[in-house]
Amino acid sequence: MKKYFLSVCVLSISLFFNSFHTLNVYAHPHPQLDEKHKHLHMSDQEINDLIKKGYTRHEVFRAYFISKHSNEKNVEKILKVYREKQSWKETAKQFGVDLEKVKKEHLKKHKEFYEKNKAQIINYLATYTGKSTASIEQYLKEDVDLHFLIFAAAISKKGNMDISKIIQDKKSGKSIKEITESAKLDPKSVFHEVKNIQHGIFEAIKNKK
């Protein structure tokens, strides 16, 4: 279950960022990859070697994503094609992968996971944000899903803001990018905080079983 959850987390984060055309995942100048990347089935050494060759961590993860859904398992070969085409859609197409179809499938999986563990996720977010479970449940009735709430919680913590302000900004039509920029936050810090929340949720679910 842990492997599945972590895969869903990373992919759902990526999909959420992409769907809003907002934040990018930047490579750290001196990346120290930890246990959180074990689910990629690539060693730290392999990932660092690719980064040393000039690829960003974001590019490595995306190329790996394509390799998981194609017959081509050589991530560097996929990265080279991407550098030539400068388009992930075209790169995926060359390797027989329909990105939109795959994204929809993963989106469906993570939504199913969230729904299955909804009560525990609500409890975790309530504790994390200092809100009552009733408040979190109320947000969910106001056209806000758990996926967005996780991002809102991360922005709330990094920006020292009340999550209700972020929810209101979303209702007024602001994108994640606009909310992040208005809070003067580093996209990298938000991304990493989202991962921390995802990890905390998994631990809460695991300990509950």
Image (tube, rainbow, N blue to C red):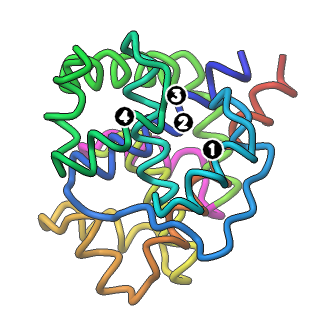
Residue that numbered label 3 is attached to: 8
Horizontal placement of 54 versus 18: left or right? right
Residue that numbered label 1 is attached to: 198
Considering only order in the chain, which callout, 4 or 3, is on the residue closer to the N terminus? Answer: 3
Specify start and end residues of the magenta stretch as a single range: 129-143
Closest to the observer: 88 or 145? Answer: 88
* Disc 4, SS: helix
Q: Which mark is residue 16?
A: none
* Disc 1, SS: helix
Label 2 is placed on what type of residue? Cys
Which is in the foreground here, disc 1 or disc 2? Answer: 2
Label 1: how many Cα within 10 Å (few below 14, some 14–19, many 20+)? many
| Residue occupying image coordinates x 67% and y 58% | 128
Pointer 1 with pointer 2, Cβ within 8 A: yes
Pointer 4 with pointer 1, Cβ within 8 A: no
Pointer 4 with pointer 2, Cβ within 8 A: no
Pointer 3 with pointer 2, Cβ within 8 A: yes
The answer to whether residue 11 is above or below residue 190 is above
Considering only order in the chain, which callout, 1 or 4, is on the residue closer to the N terminus? Answer: 4
- Residue 41 location (% of width, % of height): 67, 26
Tell me the CA gap for discs 4 and 1: 28 Å
* Disc 2, SS: helix
Considering only order in the chain, which callout, 2 or 4, is on the residue closer to the N terminus? Answer: 2
Label 4 is placed on what type of residue? Ile
Q: Which mark is residue 78?
A: 4
- Residue 30 location (% of width, % of height): 68, 73
